[in-house]
Image (cartoon, coloured by chain):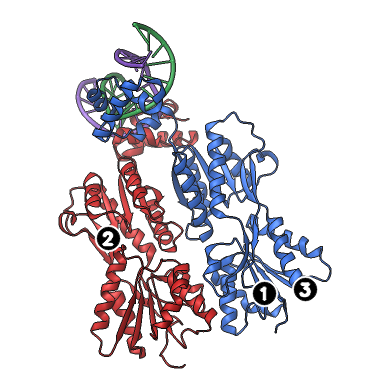
Chain colours: A red, B blue, C purple, D green
Amino acid sequence: MVTVHDVAARSGVSIATVSRTLREPHRVSDDTRVRVLAAVDELGYRPNRAASSLRRGRTGVIALVVPDIENPYFASMTKGAQVMCRARGYGLVVVDTTERAEIEDEEVRALRSQTDGLIIASSRLSDERLTEIADAAPCVLVNRRLTGPGEAVPSVTIDEETGVEAAVAHLYDLGHRGLLYVGGPSRSWSQARRSAAIAEAAASRAGLHLVQVSDCVPTSEGGRAVAREALATGATAVIAYNDLVAAGLLAQWTELGVRVPDDLSLVGFDDTFVTGLVTPPLTSVGVDLRELGDAAVELLLDRIDRPDANAEGNDRTVVPRLVVRASTAAPGAR
Amino acid sequence: MVTVHDVAARSGVSIATVSRTLREPHRVSDDTRVRVLAAVDELGYRPNRAASSLRRGRTGVIALVVPDIENPYFASMTKGAQVMCRARGYGLVVVDTTERAEIEDEEVRALRSQTDGLIIASSRLSDERLTEIADAAPCVLVNRRLTGPGEAVPSVTIDEETGVEAAVAHLYDLGHRGLLYVGGPSRSWSQARRSAAIAEAAASRAGLHLVQVSDCVPTSEGGRAVAREALATGATAVIAYNDLVAAGLLAQWTELGVRVPDDLSLVGFDDTFVTGLVTPPLTSVGVDLRELGDAAVELLLDRIDRPDANAEGNDRTVVPRLVVRASTAAPGAR
DNA sequence: CTGTTAGCGCATTCAA
DNA sequence: TTGAATGCGCTAACAG
């Protein structure tokens, strides 16, 4: 292992100067700088992160906690976070909690003292717990906003209302009057918001009849499982909790001989790459997920790098857009 | 921050005993152990990883380097690796190289000195580079086996021959005689192996005519792009480089009015969750990807934990299985 | 079984 | 502009 001492010896300066050359290049003379950097290069020196962390009290690493990395939603978010971290010289450790609150709690507890900050996406934890955590370490929430005592916790959330409104408007304008919403897990914060937003968007439209099914497992299997029930509602348009559920519905319907969009229009959520995998390609509403990851990292790093910034104004809202593809059309070609 | 000193003070022992209680519980008396652990608990003490790493010369963290975390293939692998790491008390940092060799090279260079070991999946680097890397740090390769001087580098690979053979046999036995293989990027190690294996499997079967298309972009868009060309070959059965390509082919064919499996049988590769997203569900050949991640972590940690184990026998081959779903059938229902 | 002690490699005082 | 010296928190000898 190459250390500062080796570099110092090679370039004929002290270890302090080596360290300084790397951290504050402007504080050494041009001459020494080149000599030191040359030595660094020749020896292939890389500062030991553990030592540096110990001394500085910061690790240069942040953690991203997600429920399930296999879910395209979080995979894309992770990708965005990764890119931003690279750009800002931070390391990123990704933790998959397998959707379990205990694991999330445990991991977060461990992580907060070993990283410079946390991004917690779609948390399963209670408001109280999250407030505690944010109190102990820099923290950004994604898909969750705390109200009350924890409201100082910065967060990145999606403007579900706008997204839902666009989807409902789209279907309504096509002529649909019977609408079904296949909702996800009722404990999910996003689910609650989407469900409420859909109810509201529907209520404000004359003649639009809304039915909601809830607690669908948010996977394609979940979608398959409720496909029949969905048909039985007699709706002509269906909005699914996410693209995976939509894909499941679509697959099962196809097997049952129901055609989309001829017999039934279908809208997904999140606009993941799944939309392009199925036939017909799925109309979906969502944000650029990489951007979501990006934004969370940015918010967190700003927090860390200047902790004296005002705690207010630290929430970011991302507005989704409706991407119309081939799974929606006017009803009644039947 | 709570340190060993706080715990020591609280429990009336020395800092050495605190450390010992945590690392080698059997080497302290029952009495002290309970006292120390109680203090640890009350104070919420967690050993500082940076300090521990610095002192021990090990970080307790390994890195997993993948080309693209958004790819379901690597997402699933990551999940497996994550679970195994948790079980063995290691941290995992996942790095996405966005399919770029320079980034992979750079990241690996940085990572190898800051982690206890590396898992490099589907590397874009040259054999020479990989040999060098493995020389400098514990390293496990996934989907790549080095021959010659680097053959001591442990690896986890898939028995492509067996998988391909199963797929070809399945189609042949169904009665197909015109087979098309839509191959992936020619620089890919897996692609080369699959292509060769298919040629061989086809050659050994009387009357089977094989056509290969190569360098398809390994995404659903790539599949869509070659869909027409694939039809033009006149084949009655198609094997795609991976499930994404298969999904693309399927989607495009469906739009063109070609029915699967009635007009054409289709087999994917990797058996990812994409198989269940499309209609009809895709016959696919692949390994359990989580297991692949598991195996890689296990191999690496064994290497790390007992470095004196013989360097031989450190390769693991995982045998894929053919999962027959609804996208394959006898030809000529036409 | 337990305590004392000496660093791990680095960043940062403080003097020069 | 540079160098000498200190200690971050922890673990592993070693001594008792």
Give the CA distance from mark 1 to mark 2. Answer: 45 Å
Q: Is residue A296 above or below residue A35?
A: below
Task: Give neighbour class at mark 2: few <14, some 14-19, many 20+ (Cα, 10 Å).
Answer: many
Where disc 1 sits, the SS reads: strand
- Give the labeled residue for mark 1: B265
- Looking at marks 1 and 3 on the same chain, the residue that comes earlier in the sequence is marked by 3
Could you tell me the amino acid type at mark 3?
Answer: Arg
Give the letter of the chain under mark 2. Answer: A
Q: Nearer the viewer, residue B151 or B26?
A: B26
The label on residue A102 is none
Q: In this view, does B155 lie above or below B309?
A: below
- Give the labeled residue for mark 2: A144
Give the CA distance from mark 1 to mark 3. Answer: 12 Å
Task: Give neighbour class at mark 3: few <14, some 14-19, many 20+ (Cα, 10 Å).
Answer: many
Residue at mark 1 shares a chain with residue at mark 2: no
Give the CA distance from mark 2 to mark 3. Answer: 56 Å
Q: Is residue B69 above or below residue B156?
A: below
- Give the labeled residue for mark 3: B177
User: Residue B291 in the image: x percent, y percent?
Assistant: 56, 50
Give the letter of the chain under mark 3. Answer: B
Toward the bottom, the furthest residue is A333
Could you tell me the amino acid type at mark 2?
Answer: Arg
Q: Which picture quadrant has residue A33?
A: top left
Left or right: where B21 falls relative to A206: right
Q: Which picture quadrant has residue A214?
A: bottom left
Residue at mark 2 shares a chain with residue at mark 3: no
Where disc 3 sits, the SS reads: loop
Query: Can the viewer see residue A20?
Result: no
* x 43%, y 74%: residue: A226
User: Residue A243 in the image: x percent, y percent?
Assistant: 43, 71
Query: Can the viewer see residue A42?
Result: yes
Q: Which of A266 and B153 is in front in this view?
A: A266
